Amino acid sequence: MFTLKKTQILNAPINKVFPFFESPENLEKITPPSLGFIIKTPKPLEMKEGAIFDYTIKLGIIKFPWKTLISKYNPPHLFQDIQKFGPYKKWEHTHEFFDMGDKTKIVDTVVYDLYPSFLSKIINSLFIKQRVEKKYLIIELNHRKNF
């Protein structure tokens, strides 16, 4: 099992930041184009605990279906999505938001695991870890453009 934790501070209050992040449509806008991220769930999309969203995502040259479940939803402080179906053995992404007055601190924690288990450390170090970290760096830069 692997964990990636990223923290960023945006120059906007939590009441502006959280609504942007909770919108699945915005995830499609800020995800790097190389991931081929497309929302398949018919719109309008409603963020709430128990909501399920279908996407496609590209890893390398292969497109994968991806289904996520919103397992926790506590606006404007937290939401968590978990992979119900997709390319990872496990994917659990927790988004936390901390009010800092005119700024907002965001902590993203991703806990993930890979198939096959006996090769997961090698696959992660050679391919996945750098892709996930790069994806979050690009997303972080895209967040800053919106605030």
Image: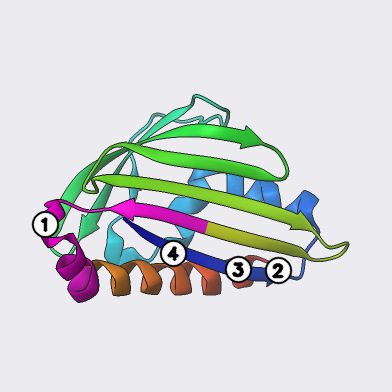
- Residue type at mark 4 is Leu
50 lies above or below 10: above
88 lies above or below 102: above
Q: Residues within 10 Å of mark 3 (few under 14, many from 20)?
A: few
Report the disc number at residue 7.
3
Spatial distance from mark 2 to mark 4, Cα to Cα? 19 Å
Q: Which of marks 1 and 4 is nearer the N terminus?
A: 4
Point out the frontmost of discs 2 and 3: 3
Residue pictured at 48% horizontal, 61% vertical: 30
Region rendered in magenta:
109-127
Magenta-drawn stretch contains 125: yes
In the rendered structure, the answer to whether residue 125 lies left or right of residue 51 reads left
Residue pictured at 54% horizontal, 58% vertical: 108
Point out the frontmost of discs 1 and 4: 1
Residue named by callout 4: 4
Q: How crowded is mark 1: few (under 14 residues within 10 Å), some or many (20 or more)?
A: few
